[in-house]
């Protein structure tokens, strides 16, 4: 990208700590035509139409959330939708959402992909990309969905009411086809028979509550499923991704699979890194998610995996439900649908728990939340890094701002106090979020019109390498 430095920039961000891939440096940042036009040494400025004073702030690349559920199109739009979901994304520092295929209809064909696109395009305030559901009953549709722009394919080894269960044979054949097209499959990795049978037995015995939900989905269910995925991937050569890893006991299985040459990336959630079984016990149906929130000891293993690079990225698995959805089941943990909100707190939670409590460097957080998911999902030519020529997707964050989350002040449609995040004290806050150089969130308010976001199609095999010299373009 060549920049005319004689022409005024659209935006100049001054005095901030720029979170680059190689480290965090004090400097200025120039934006023109929606792109990062120049990274400037501290004190070097260019004329600009708008100036932003970023003193005492971190300037992060926009978060790329690889795992969100907006549940639209769907019946009645009572739960989540693209407008509410991307508004919350903007508040959480998320500039690109990768949305899951569990809408109605499921995203298994060109027609259903385009239907979702038509619904989304007039609502989104951030950029977005779309998963497809693995169409194991019609393998020709894999190529069709790739042509539409699906970034990857989701498959469930657990029983999911919204998605068909896969036989081992169908999964093997589908993995061969996905391998042929050089794409990957993301898995919900839990053994269906173990969790379904255990839950049924516990329900029949009259057991309920948050801890009963945890006991019904033991570690072995996740461990077995990941083992099976690894074996099938080794057999077929298919590239695989483990969604929302909750069990630290699966660590050795993942290590061994990678040691045998299996291409496997792993994602976990802020929910698993911040909440534990005490929160699940306290909040019960309002903290139900699959896989479940586990023990504090398990949480420490997940953190160690994050710190050592064994977990590649973070996703929110944002999937909120209305209070009516929860309350109508009168505390029955088995009847309540699973899912937590989370995208609105994506970066604040990690500033608090990661940067401030564990001393994780800002560039490590940016890797986990921006560059790694962007590259993995084929978005890394435009998204995920503070680098000249990239989309100016940026988050100005105050790592020292202390505040308390209140659901009633959410920018989304579900202004609920009935979530495990209610009343949580945090150190670290998003001040401003920009998508392609335009401010979409500032100081507690969404300031973008519906429909300003764009669908981002993946570009695989043309992603800049991790040592691509992100300091290129710094002017001294």
Image (cartoon, grey):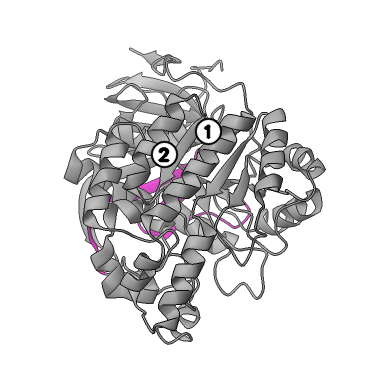
The dot on residue 313 is 2
Nearer to the camera, 187 or 364: 187
Residue 112: mark in rendering: none
Residue 149 visible in the shown view: no
Instruction: Report the span colored magenta.
Output: 423-451
Residue wearing tag 1: 376
Q: Is residue 382 left or right of residue 459?
A: left
- Above or below for 430 versus 387: below
Horizontal relation, residue 293 to residue 413: left or right: left
444 vs 103, nearest the viewer: 103
Mark 1 closeness class: few <14, some 14–19, many ≥20 residues within 10 Å:
many
The picture places residue 127, in percent across and down from the top left corner, at 57, 45
Q: Nearer the viewer, residue 454 or 63?
A: 63
The C terminus is located in which quarter? top left
Residue at image x 53%, y 43%? 228
Between marks 1 and 2, how big is the CA–CA gap? 9 Å
């Amino acid at each position: 990208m060549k920049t005319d430095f004689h022409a005024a920039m659209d935006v100049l961000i001054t005095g901030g700590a720029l979170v680059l891939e190689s480290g965090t440096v004090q400097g200025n940042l120039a934006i023109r035509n929606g792109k990062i036009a120049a990274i400037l040494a501290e004190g070097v400025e260019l004329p600009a139409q708008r100036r932003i004073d970023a003193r005492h702030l971190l300037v992060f690349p926009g978060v790329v959330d690889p795992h969100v559920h907006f549940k639209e199109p769907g019946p009645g739009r009572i739960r989540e939708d693209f407008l509410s979901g991307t508004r919350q994304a903007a508040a959480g520092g998320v500039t690109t959402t990768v949305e899951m295929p569990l809408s109605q209809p499921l995203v298994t064909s060109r027609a259903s992909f385009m239907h979702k696109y038509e619904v989304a395009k007039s609502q989104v305030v951030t950029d977005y990309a779309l998963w497809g559901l693995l169409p194991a009953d019609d393998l020709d549709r894999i190529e069709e969905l790739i042509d539409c722009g699906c970034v990857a394919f989701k498959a469930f080894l657990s029983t999911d009411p919204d998605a068909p269960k896969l036989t081992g044979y169908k999964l093997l054949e589908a993995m061969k086809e996905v391998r042929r097209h050089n794409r990957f499959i993301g898995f919900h990795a839990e053994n269906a028979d173990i969790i379904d049978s255990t839950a049924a037995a516990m329900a029949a015995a009259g057991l309920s509550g948050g801890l009963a939900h945890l006991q019904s989905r033991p570690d072995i269910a996740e461990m077995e499923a990941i083992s099976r995925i690894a074996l099938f991937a080794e057999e077929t050569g298919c590239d695989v991704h483990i969604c929302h890893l909750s069990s630290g006991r699966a660590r050795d299985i993942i290590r061994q699979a990678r040691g045998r040459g299996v291409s496997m990336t792993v994602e976990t959630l802020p929910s698993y890194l911040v909440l534990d079984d005490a929160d699940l016990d306290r909040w019960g149906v309002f903290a139900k998610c699959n896989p479940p929130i586990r023990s504090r000891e398990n949480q420490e293993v997940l953190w160690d995996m994050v710190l050592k690079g064994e977990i590649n990225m973070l996703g929110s698995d944002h999937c909120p439900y209305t209070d009516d959805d929860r309350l109508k089941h009168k505390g029955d943990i088995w009847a309540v649908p699973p899912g937590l909100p989370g995208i609105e707190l994506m970066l604040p939670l990690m500033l608090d728990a990661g940067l401030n409590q564990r001393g994780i460097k800002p560039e490590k957080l940016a890797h986990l939340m921006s560059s790694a998911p962007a590259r993995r999902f084929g978005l890394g030519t435009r998204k995920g890094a503070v680098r000249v020529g990239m989309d100016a997707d940026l988050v100005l964050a105050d790592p020292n701002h202390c505040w308390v989350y209140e659901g009633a002040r959410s920018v989304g449609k579900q202004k609920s106090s009935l979530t495990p995040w209610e009343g949580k004290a945090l150190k670290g806050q998003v001040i401003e979020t920009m998508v392609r150089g335009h401010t979409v969130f500032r100081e507690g308010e969404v300031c973008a019109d519906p429909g300003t976001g764009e669908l981002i199609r993946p570009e695989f095999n043309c992603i800049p390498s991790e040592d691509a010299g992100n300091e290129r373009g710094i002017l001294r």
